Image (cartoon, helix red, strand yellow):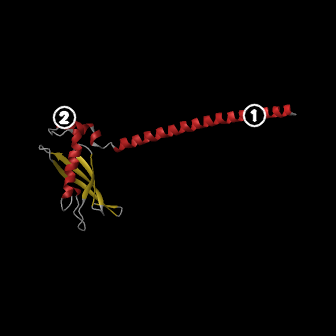
Amino acid sequence: MKRSLYLYLLIISVLLNLFTYAYFSKEKARTENKLTTSTKKLKDSILALENKVDDALYFSFERNSNALDYFAVTSPITIESDKLVPHVSNQLMAFNDKPEGNPYTGQTPINGKKFIINKVRVLNHRWIIADYSDGTFWGEVLIKYFINSDNSVSFEVIQSLIYQNDQAVR
C-alpha cells in the first residue's frame, strides 16, 4: 500500500513538474514576444516623432543651408549665423516695451490693451513669423527683416492676422 502511494505521489510530482515546465516555457516565449512587439512599437513611435520634429523644423533658419550660406558667403554682415536668430529675436522683442505695443504686430491697441509679440521663429535670411496677443485677442504676423551694416535690424510687416472668436480677421 505504501509503495503504490509513493508511486502515485511520484507520478503526480513528475506530471506537476512537466506541466510547470511547459507553462513557464510558454510564458517565457509569450513574454519575449510581447517585449519584441513593444520594442517594435516604441521604435516606430520614435521614428514617427523624429519625422514630426524634422517636419516642424523644416522652416527654420538653423536648418536652411541657403539662408546660412547667405550670411556666411554673400552678406557683408558681421554677425555669426549661430548668433543671428537670438539677435533678430531680441531686436524684435525689444519693441514690446513701447507704450502703444509692438508696432510690428500690425495691430493698434484694442480697448487700451497693447499687442506684444510672444514667440518668434526666424524662418530664413529674410522672413520671421511671430505670435502676438493683448491678453484677449491673439494673432500671427509675417515680418520681413533686414540686417543693416551697423548690425541693427530693420523690420517690415508683410501680413498680419488676428483671431477673434475662432474666426480670422484681416
Please give the label number shown on residue 138.
none
Q: Residue at the far right: name it.
A: 1
* 1 vs 2, front mark: 1
Q: Label 1 amino acid?
A: Ser
Considering only vertical position in the picture, is 91 above or below 2? below
Disc 1 crowd, CA 10 A, few/some/many (<14, 14-19, 20+): few
Please give the label number shown on residue 73.
2
Please tell me which of labels 1 and 2 falls first in the chain: 1
Q: Label 2 amino acid?
A: Val
Considering only vertical position in the picture, is 9 above or below 49? above
Percent x, y of residue 110: 25, 66
Q: What is the distance, in whole Å, between disc 1 and disc 2 at their CAs?
A: 83 Å
**Residue at image coords 25%, 37%:** 66
**Element under label 1?**
helix
Residue 18 is left or right of residue 156, and the answer is right
User: Dividing the image into 4 quarters, which one contains the C terminus?
Assistant: bottom left
**Residue at image coords 81%, 32%:** 6
Percent x, y of residue 145: 19, 48
Please give the label number shown on residue 13.
1
Q: Quadrant of residue 103?
A: bottom left
Q: Quadrant of residue 36?
A: top right
Percent x, y of residue 37: 54, 38
Please name whichever residue, 62 or 1, is drawn nearer the observer in this view of the structure: 1
